[in-house]
Amino acid sequence: MKNSRTATAAIAAGALAVSIALVGCSSDDKSDSSASTSTTSAATSSASKSSSAEASGKAPKSKLTPKSGDTAAANETIATYIADEKIIETPVKPGDPGAPTIDLPIPEGWEVVDQGDDSYAAIVYTGPEAANTDFPPNFIAILSKLEGNVDAKKLIEYAGGEVKNLPNYAPLLEGEEGTLSGFPAYQIAATFEDSGTTYVIAQKTAVITGADGAIYVLQLNGTSDETLQDILGSATSAVDDGTTITP
C-alpha cells in the first residue's frame, strides 16, 4: 500500500505492544515504570535529537507494513487487503479534525522522537544499554483513516500477515485477538533476521470506529535487536496497559 511503513535496521522500526509475549522474556517488575507524560502532548513540542531519530529507524517506504520489500509475501496483509478493495488510506496526525486521540505512555528511560510525516508518534530507548547497539528498542504508532469498502473483521484477520512475512520469522507469540483501550485488536510477536542480525518485533493493531463514523486502524509497533528484548518487553507492558484511545 502506498503509505505503508517498513520495519528495520534495513527495516525501519516496526511493531508493538504485545506485552504477553515479550514480558515473558523479561521482568514483570518494570511494568510500573511508565511516566505520566503521553506522546500526544510531547510529540507536538519535541525537538528530537538527530542521533535518536536515526537510531529509531530510516525513512519509510510506506505505512502499516513492517517488512522489507524483498520479503516474499506468503501471508495476506492489511496492505494487500486495502489495495485489493481499493480502500482510500489517509495518514492521521495528532489533532487532525474528527480523528481519534491516542495517548501513549512514555516508559522511564524512553524519549519522544520525530519519526517523519507518516507516524502518529514515536519513542526510542535512550538508557545506557542503547549505547551498545545500532538499533535500540523503539516504538512507532501509526494511525490511518480508511474510506471505502472496509470490513473491520478483515482488518483483524489480516493484521498479523506483515510480521509473519518477515525473513526467518520465528514466533514468540502466535497471533491472537484481544483489545486495546476497549477496541478490537490483534497482537503478535516474533524474532526475524536481517543481514545476519536477529531482531525482536512486536505488534498490536487496533480497529477504531471514530466519532465521525469512519474506520481507523492504529498500529503500535515495537522493535529492538535481540540483545535488548528484555527492555523492549518491559516497555511493551507499560504501553499496552497505559494506552488510551478517545474516539
Image: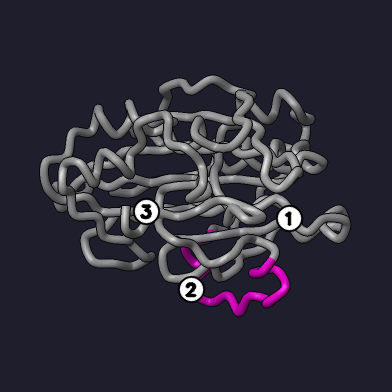
Between 199 and 184, the one lying in front of the other is 199
Q: Quadrant of residue 91?
A: bottom left
Q: How is the image coloured?
A: one colour
Rendered position, 176 above or below 67: above
Which mark is first along the chain, 3 or 1?
1
Looking at the image, can residue 63 be seen?
yes
- Give the alpha-carbon distance from disc 3 to disc 2, as whole Å: 16 Å
Label 2 neighbourhood size at 10 Å, few (<14), some (14-19), many (20+)?
few
Q: Is residue 155 above or below residue 196?
A: above
> Which span of residues is magenta-colored?
39-54
Say whether residue 77 is magenta: no
- Point out the frontmost of discs 1 and 3: 1
Question: How many badges with numbers are in the image?
Answer: 3
Q: Amino acid at mark 3?
A: Leu
Q: Which residue is mark 2?
A: 44
Rendered image: mark on residue 143: 3
The residue under the point 55% across, 70% down is 114
Q: Position of residue 159 (x, y in %)?
A: 39, 33
Q: Residue at x 42, y 70 (%)?
A: 117
Q: Nearer the viewer, mark 1 or mark 2?
A: 1
What is the C-alpha distance between the residues marked 1 and 3?
A: 23 Å
* SS at circle 3: strand
What is the number of the mark on residue 135? Answer: 1
Residue at screen point 61% across, 59% down: 123
* Disc 1 + disc 2, Cβ < 8 Å: no
User: Alpha carbon of mark 1 to alpha carbon of mark 2: how far?
Assistant: 24 Å
> Which tag, 3 or 2, sits closer to the chain's start?
2
